[in-house]
Amino acid sequence: MPVVQQTDTINNQTMLRHLNADILIVDDTISNLEILTTVLTDQGYQVQSATNGNIALQVIQNKQPDLILLDIMMPEMSGYEVCQRLKEDPQTTHIPVIFISALHELVDLQKAFDVGGADFITKPFLIEELLVKIKYQLLMK
């Protein structure tokens, strides 16, 4: 009986970490940021946002998120480059990155994983799919 109670405690602690997770959304389209912020805060997540890769890297230096949702096509610095920089830095290499993009070719998906992405969601996406993938990445962390 104590083993079951201990397992339940571990599962509850894992779920609490998941619910209090800090997520950074990086997208140059304000409407995407607004929608994602609303959805994620309604789910109990703490949300930060950035409209380009340079701002995202600054935000991450100040407070590391538990997970990053990252658009690929952005001005100045692509999501691929942002992810690659994060994965090259020992301080941020552990942060899971889920790419969210209108790109849908196999080469785009392969490049996202090659630079260190943990997952890939094609726009337009289902909210339910996004939430499941976020939860999975947070639980795996």
Image (spheres, helix red, strand yellow):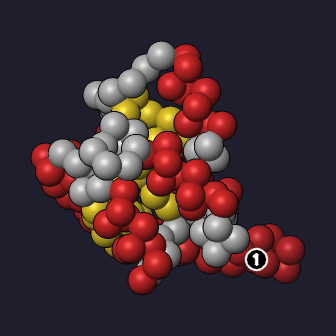
Residue 19, position as x, y percentages in the image: 45, 69
Viewer can see residue 57: yes
Q: Quadrant of the N terminus?
A: bottom right
Residue 78, position as x, y percentages in the image: 40, 44
Badge 1 amino acid: Gln
Residue 128, position as x, y percentages in the image: 38, 39
Say above or below: 41 vs 80: below
As rendered, which of 93 and 129 lies closer to the eye? 93
Q: Quadrant of the C terminus?
A: bottom right
As rendered, which of 68 and 85 lies closer to the eye? 85
Which class describes the residues within 10 Å of circle 1: few (<14), some (14-19), or many (20+)?
few
Residue at 47%, 54% (x, y): give it.
Answer: 82
Residue farthest to the front, as pictured: 76
Query: Helix, strand or loop at disc 1?
Result: helix
Q: Is residue 21 left or right of residue 3?
A: left
Q: How many marks?
A: 1
Residue at 39%, 24% (x, y): give it.
Answer: 103
Residue 52, position as x, y percentages in the image: 29, 55
Say above or below: 139 vs 77: below
Residue at 64%, 58% (x, y): give it.
Answer: 87
Residue at 37%, 33% (x, y): give it.
Answer: 101
Q: Is residue 124 left or right of residue 136?
A: left
Viewer can see residue 128: no
Question: Residue under circle 1?
Answer: 5
Q: Quadrant of residue 95?
A: bottom right
Q: Is residue 68 left or right of residue 39?
A: right
Q: Quadrant of residue 62?
A: bottom left
